[in-house]
Image (cartoon, grey):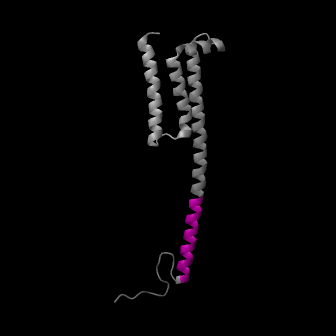
């Protein structure tokens, strides 16, 4: 591996880590969603700094081409991120459905209470009196 490739790998991994930390700092990315991204960035940094780790890991696992191992790990991380996002989306959809039902029940309750108040005051729910025709002089 030449020096430019080596330096590019390190810089790219560091940029990924800085981007993740910056997104977390701004509140754009929450910690629980950043875990897998941060893990992937750290793994990329380790492989960039110590490329022989990838070669040794590939040999240990019986993978003929070390780059195939990196693709497999990257796809695995993307799968975990996607799975986590899907689970979070399902949880949010369920919560939104519950909140929508609560709002609908609250609106119905308010309408019933308003019509009851209007009935007790002797007027219909539109606020017009049932006491007879109004005189305009």
Reply above or below: 124 against 92. Answer: below
Image spot of residue 105 (x, y percent): 59, 63
Indicate left or right for 76 with 14 as reference: right
Q: Is residue 117 magenta?
A: yes
Point 46% across, 43% down: residue: 27
Reply above or below: 133 against 47. Answer: below
Q: Is residue 22 magenta?
A: no
Point 44% across, 41% down: residue: 26
Quadrant that contains the C terminus: bottom left
Indicate left or right for 104 with 7 as reference: right
Image spot of residue 68 (x, y percent): 57, 15
Image spot of residue 38 (x, y percent): 53, 31
Magenta highlight range: 102-120
Image spot of residue 116 (x, y percent): 57, 77
Q: Residue furthest right?
A: 61
Majority secondary structure of the magenta segment? helix
Name the one closer to the observer, 90 or 108.
90
Q: Residue furthest left?
A: 137
Name the one closer to the observer, 137 or 64.
64
Reply above or below: 84 against 130. Answer: above
Reply above or below: 70 against 33. Answer: above
Point 43% across, 18% down: residue: 8
Point 51% across, 75% down: residue: 125
Indicate left or right for 42 with 7 as reference: right
Quadrant of the rendered structure where residue 99 is? bottom right
- Count how many numbered circles sit on residues in the image: 0
Name the one closer to the observer, 107 or 45.
45
């Amino acid at each position: 591996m030449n020096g430019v490739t080596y330096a590019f790998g390190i810089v790219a991994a560091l940029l990924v880590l800085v981007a993740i930390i910056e997104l977390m700092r701004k509140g754009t990315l929450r910690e629980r969603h950043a875990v897998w991204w941060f893990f992937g960035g750290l793994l990329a940094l380790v492989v960039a700094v110590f490329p022989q780790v990838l070669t040794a890991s590939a040999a240990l696992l019986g993978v003929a081409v070390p780059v195939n191992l990196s693709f497999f790990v990257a796809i695995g991380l993307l799968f975990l991120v996607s799975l986590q996002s899907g689970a979070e989306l399902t949880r949010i959809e369920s919560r939104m459905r519950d909140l929508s039902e609560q709002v609908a029940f609250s609106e119905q309750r308010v309408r019933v209470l308003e019509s009851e108040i209007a009935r007790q005051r002797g007027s219909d729910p539109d606020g017009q009196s049932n006491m007879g025709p109004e005189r305009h002089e």
